[in-house]
Image (spheres, rainbow, N blue to C red):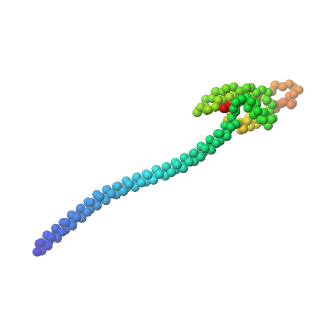
Amino acid sequence: MSKAIGHKKKKVLGILLGTVLVIVTVHSTVIQLLGDSIAKTQAKISEAQFKLRKSEFNVSKSKQIMANLQDLEKTISRQEQSVPRGDVYLWMLKSIDQFKVRNNIELNQIEPPKPAETNTLPPLPYSMMNFTLSGHGHYQDIGFFVDDFEQTFPYVRLRSLEIEPIAYTKSSAEEQDETLQFKASFVTPTK
């Protein structure tokens, strides 16, 4: 009987050991596969969360960009209101008149505008006109005139400015010793 009990114990022990071995094998393979699957799923979740945060950031930036774009369109629209239309020469005469008084210069000649070439990128939807004027005044007054004109009309650009002393007689030398003669060439867009 003790032999039978010993044999049964060995059988039970073998079954128990086999069951433990099967449980460990199943646990290690199934649980490890599930763990790998969970890790991959967590990585996908992290990646999706990152993409979501990035998309939310881009959406907020796009709203800001659209608001800036609308502000710029309003600014351009306001500035286009002062771009010369129609008779550019008449516009120039009226515009220059107010500046020569404010800046204490004398204008001798205002040439009619001529078409100007532009090599801007991107191409502008405006035609460009070049106008030249000449006159005389003190150095500072000429500088103030050019600055005032460009500040009032930011789209008008100075192409060239030539300054030289006025040829004068000895009797008027004391009066005109600081007076300079200038010739300025501006370019402006027109509609």
Residue 23 shown left or right of residue 143 in the figure: left
From the viewer's side, name the closer residue of 131 and 184: 131
Q: How many marks?
A: 0
Quarter the C terminus occupies: top right
Looking at the picture, does residue 167 appear above or below residue 62? Answer: above
Quarter the N terminus occupies: bottom left
From the viewer's side, name the closer residue of 95 and 169: 95
Residue drawn where x is 26% and y is 62% of the image:
24
Question: Residue 78: which quarter of the image?
Answer: top right
Residue drawn where x is 67% and y is 26% of the image:
115
Residue 177 shown left or right of residue 63 in the figure: right
Can residue 185 be seen here? The reply is no
Residue drawn where x is 31% and y is 59% of the image:
31
Q: Position of residue 39 (x, y in %)?
A: 37, 55
Q: Position of residue 46 (x, y in %)?
A: 43, 54
Residue drawn where x is 80% and y is 33% of the image:
105
Question: Residue 99: which quarter of the image?
Answer: top right
